[in-house]
Amino acid sequence: MFLTHLQASNFRNYKTLDLSFNEQKNINLIVAKNGMGKSNFLEMLYYLSHLRAFRNASDKDLILHGQNNFHLFCEYENKGIHGNVRVTYSGKKEILLDDKKIVKHSQILGKLQTVFFGSNDISIISGTPVERRVFFDIFLSIIDSDYLTALRTYGLLVKQKNALIKSKRNDILSFFDTQIADVAFLLMTKRKLLIEKVSKLFSTVFKDIGNFKDTAFIKYNSSFEREFGSAKELLDYILYQDKFDFDRGYCILGPHKDNYYFILNNTVFSKYASLGQIRLGALVLKLVQAMCYEEKFKTTPILLLDDVILELDSEKQKRFLDKICGKYQLFITLTDERCKNFFDNQNAVEIIKVSNGSILQ
């Protein structure tokens, strides 16, 4: 997959932007001092593929100060087929995929594939269970539309069940439990299968780049703390659990309470690993995400790297770049264009200088 053209207006601190990209120069370095709009540039690309910001911001917050709308447009090529995405927001979002209006966000997921690497990614490993669930839910939703549908259905069912519990109604609770068991069993099964694949890749790539003898892997942990052979087995357990839910006033267990553990030498990362190992683990996780997208969609996603290259020491940095250069189209933010020397193939590097939301020629 290769992005060929990007346009924007009134997005973040960019008044206007119009750039074309050369396939022979697949390493794009976005160079600027901090606060000039490097990350905002990457956010345009992320937004066009995910229809949301990678930072906590509403669509309204993305509009340039003093304006009342923003517009994004890109063209891309994927295995000889050309496509485009257009998003306009002016209080209401309008999305066009290949010049045709779409209504559901799920229609665009996986079409333009990007993977974002940011310094805050370490929170996936060392942060809260919620942060890990959000990451893996987005990950799975992009490669499996059935998972996305089930996840949305499950969220609605749990919300309805909690309302029944709070109103002390148990007359129709079993009706919701039956539906919850079916959807929860599907979610748990798909999460387990994903982590089995991701963990193997994570372990191999972490060892390759880190040059470690340490063993690293990822473990999926259901909040039920046991496995079920069928939705019927799960339903029986949920029905038993209902009395505890009534005492607490909400649904205690289920996929909405699941967790994922990153393990290094049989100990949770956050208790054993150094900050450098956690940072490397976060980069490896995102690279594995890109590898899974590649396997699923039979094309390489676009990688967006926001000030993360310098977080690695020189040896790990080289091994990491060797994994991605020449294979993926890259957009990398840096504060110094001399960092161009990190890359072996200088002819593949394009430097894009940014200042206060403007591209310097």
Image (cartoon, rainbow, N blue to C red):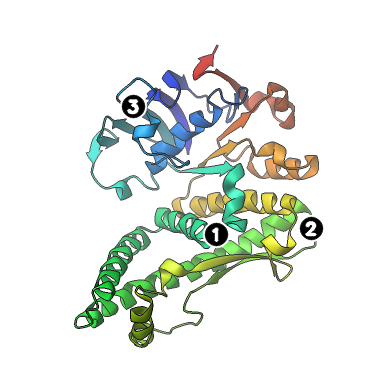
Q: What element carries label 1?
A: loop
Q: Residue at the spot x=41%, y=67% of the render?
A: 256
In the image, 101: left or right of 246?
A: left
* Alpha-carbon span between mark 2 and mark 3: 46 Å
Q: What residue type is labelled 1?
A: Thr
Q: What element carries label 3?
A: strand
The residue identified by callout 3 is 71
Can you give x and y, in whole percent of width and height, for residue 247 in the image? 36, 81
Q: Which amino acid does label 2 sit on?
A: Phe
Compared with 33, 119 (above or below) is below
Can you give x and y, in whole percent of width and height, for residue 312 in the image? 73, 43
Within 10 Å of disc 3 (Cα), the crowding (few <14, some 14-19, many 20+) is some
Q: Residue at the spot x=68%, y=55% of the render?
A: 205
Residue 56 visible in the picture: yes
The residue identified by callout 1 is 128
* Alpha-carbon span between mark 3 and mark 1: 34 Å
Within 10 Å of disc 1 (Cα), the crowding (few <14, some 14-19, many 20+) is few
Residue 80 visible in the picture: no
Q: Which of marks 3 and 1 is in front?
A: 1
- Mark 2 and mark 3 lie on one chain; the one further toward the N terminus is 3
Q: Is mark 2 on a helix, strand or loop?
A: loop
Q: Between residues 172 and 167, which one lies in front from this camera angle? A: 167
Numbered circle sitting on residue 212: 2
Numbered circle sitting on residue 88: none
* Alpha-carbon span between mark 1 and mark 2: 26 Å
- Mark 1 and mark 2 lie on one chain; the one further toward the N terminus is 1
